[in-house]
Amino acid sequence: MYLYPKWIRIWHVINALVFLILIVTGLSMQYTDKENATYVVGFAKAVRMHNFAALILVINYIFFVCGNFLSKNGSYYRISRKNFMPDLIRQYKFYSSGMFKGEKHPFPVTEERKFNPLQKITYVLALYVAVPLLIISGIGLLLPEITITTIFGISGLILTDILHITMGFFLSIFMIIHIYTCTLGHKPTSLFRGIITGYHVSEDE
Ligand code: HEM
């Protein structure tokens, strides 16, 4: 099944690389000691690299949103209220016990359903909630003059910083879990092959 068009594969590889750069340079800025020690990348270089990678992330993100809006790919992200919780629980039970007993995937991939319910909700939360908040708070930190000075007596810049770091943290955890769940296809390498070649190989092929 051809499920990953070229544009989504290009978006994905750029997104994954840029995320890795943002994580490394973000942690470098967080932990580099003002007086001396450098953590992986020196502070000034980390700032420059972080800003540049963020710019690429934003352009790439706009490309992702427009691509999903204009193509069939967007339909895979639509969440239906019907059976929402029961389906999530079914998928969770498969990941937590069913797959260890050799059970079949409860929501096999089809032309109409690329993602299982857990994948869909995590992709929507990551791409349509966490990434926009990460970008907005990042712009707030880059341009402090446009950031609200105080909110209920607390510095707006500190709150923006906390939001940015929290989203960065959640997305880093997302990425680790995402890579792990991507090993749970028909074979450990099947889903990785899919996002590189465009073709998904299902259990019965
Ligand atoms: C080195 C890092 C990464 C690897 C190895 C990786 C691997 C994969 C693989 C194998 C797939 C295909 C399986 C599927 O459709 O679920 C996939 C799809 C996807 N990944 Fe990643 N990923 C990485 C980073 C990221 C990051 C950082 C994000 C977002 C913040 C992300 C978001 C997505 C999304 C939304 C899809 C589905 C795309 C679509 O078909 O519409 N990935 N990834």
Image: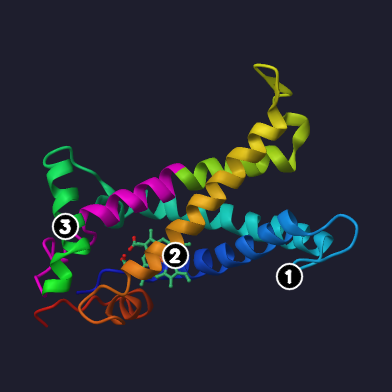
Q: Residues within 10 Å of mark 2 (few under 14, many from 20)?
A: few
Q: Residues within 10 Å of mark 3 (few under 14, many from 20)?
A: few
Picture residue at 65% right of the left edge, 61% below the top:
53
Mark nearer the N terminus (1 vs 3):
1
Q: Tell me the distance, in whole angstroms, between the alpha carbons under discs 1 and 3.
A: 40 Å
Q: Is residue 111 magenta?
A: yes
Q: Which residues are magenta?
A: 102-129
Q: Nearer the viewer, residue 141 or 169?
A: 169
Q: Is residue 71 left or right of residue 84?
A: right
Q: Which mark is residue 155?
A: none
Q: Residues within 10 Å of mark 1 (few under 14, many from 20)?
A: some
- The residue singled out by tag 2 in the image is 176
Picture residue at 73% right of the left edge, 43% below the top:
142
- The residue singled out by tag 3 in the image is 93
Mark 3 belongs to which amino acid? Answer: Lys
Q: Quadrant of the N terminus?
A: bottom left
**Nearer mark to the viewer, of 1 and 3:** 3
Expressed as whole percent of the image width and height from the top left, the position of residue 106 reads: 11, 62
Asked which quadrant contains residue 104, the reply is bottom left
Picture residue at 17% right of the left edge, 72% below the top:
100
Q: Which mark is residue 40?
A: 1
Expressed as whole percent of the image width and height from the top left, the position of residue 202 reads: 16, 76
Mark 2 belongs to which amino acid? Answer: Ile
Expressed as whole percent of the image width and height from the top left, the position of residue 99 reads: 16, 70
